[in-house]
Image (tube, rainbow, N blue to C red):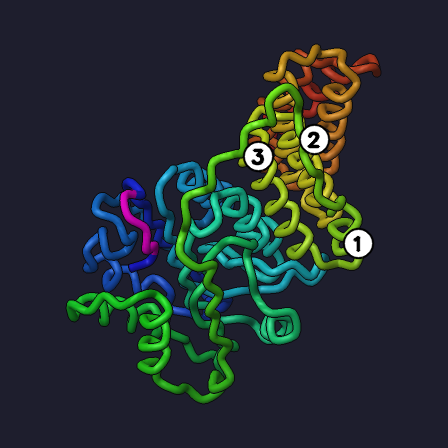
Amino acid sequence: MVITVKDTGPGTALLLAASPAGKSGFTDATSVLPALAAVSPGILTGTTAATIVELADPIDPQTVLTRIRAAATTPGPLTLFLAGQLHLDAKQHLIHFALGRTTPTTLRYSALPWHWLASELGPRAPGSTTVVADLTATPDTWQRIRQDGLTIAPGIRLYGRVAPQLPRRRTAEPAYLKAIATIWRSGSNPPLAQLHEQAIAQVPVQTGSDDALHLAMDTGPLAAPAPPAGPAPGRRPPRPEPDDPLPAILAAAHAGHHSEAAALASMWEGRALRTYGADSAEAVHWIEIRADLARLAGDPARSCELWMSAADARLARQQLPDDPTVVDAVDRAHHQWQELRDARRAHDLGPALAALRAHVPGRRPGAVAAVRHRMQLLDGGAAS
């Protein structure tokens, strides 16, 4: 169904349905999970063998990120089913997928940033990832999506439906995903594009959501990569380098288009991973770019994580702890950690940073002690 490729190995389906509790929730997202769970796992993934992961009203974005990251590392086809609501961060104007404890005032810390999907799924092989979404958007988010569209990253199939929030506190249902589950359970298994059209036709029209946006972005069937051409006897053909994409990425970030910038960076990181390998300098370079993009987007926790990943990757490449690029990565991770006002997130990231800082003390005296001092404060329930 989803991936029309033979002999792709086991597939993975991640079912994520969430809506905030109380007045912040306007979507009955989890009501679709029983219908999807009743579908054969192999139908959900399009493979003979399948692994199903279900997340119902999760409350911690880091936990969701960990599950998505784990699923993204699987070698076979990956299908992500999303049901829930989208909100716009008023400060950074970033789209977020609401979780169980999301409120308008805690959005930046209690919801899943949409560009995180691009960061985690973008590096996967083109055509190996499918996202099927049934989403409802707040009025400001809906206007943003109507203007800029909704994408994840190049190379990812994206099918679904996005509708505006219903008026007068009415609760929306994930009717699109329920229609897909009904079609599958009837014994029909059409190609994804046809399945999408059939499901859209079955979604009942609700007042206030007549102008829903239908998502249908297909990368085409996954094809085996062509074998690399060998060098001519007796000489090396130089490897062609593409035009530098960094200026366009930074321009998008500085213009406030953070999701677009993150998606582009993830695409180029994926290209570096496939071309040069996970332990290459090129791959580390793109981790560092994504770390800086997270800083520009006002996400110090994510920036800190990525800078630590870059430092670990450089150390794994046998670079010394006093190498300027290693020191710079740890310094930047430390700085972003200091910028983090969320005490719980700072506490979660602290041990990894403390261990890294002990190994890479840096140029300034007292850096190791500074991390330990703040960790003591955080352990006591206060942030410095």
Q: Quadrant of residue 373?
A: top right
Name which residue type carries label 2: Pro
Q: Which residue is mark 3?
A: 275
Please provide the residue range marked out in magenta.
Answer: 3-7
Q: Position of residue 190 (x, y in %)?
A: 26, 68
Q: Work out whether mark 1 precedes mark 2 in sequence or the reverse, and give the earlier one.
A: 2
Q: Which residue is mark 1?
A: 251
From this view, report whether residue 330 is shown above or below residue 22: above
From this view, report whether residue 352 is shown above or below residue 93: above
Point out the image quarter for the C terminus: top right
Name which residue type carries label 3: Thr
Q: Residues within 10 Å of mark 2 (few under 14, many from 20)?
A: few
In the image, residue 199 lies in the stretch drawn in magenta: no
Give the residue at the far front of this rendering. 233
Q: Secondary structure at mark 3?
A: helix
**Numbered disc in front, either 1 or 3:** 3
Q: Work out whether mark 3 precedes mark 2 in sequence or the reverse, and give the earlier one.
A: 2
Q: Residues within 10 Å of mark 3 (few under 14, many from 20)?
A: few
Name which residue type carries label 1: Ala
Q: Which residue is mark 2?
A: 238
Point out the image quarter for the N terminus: bottom left
Which sits in the foreground, 86 or 39? 39
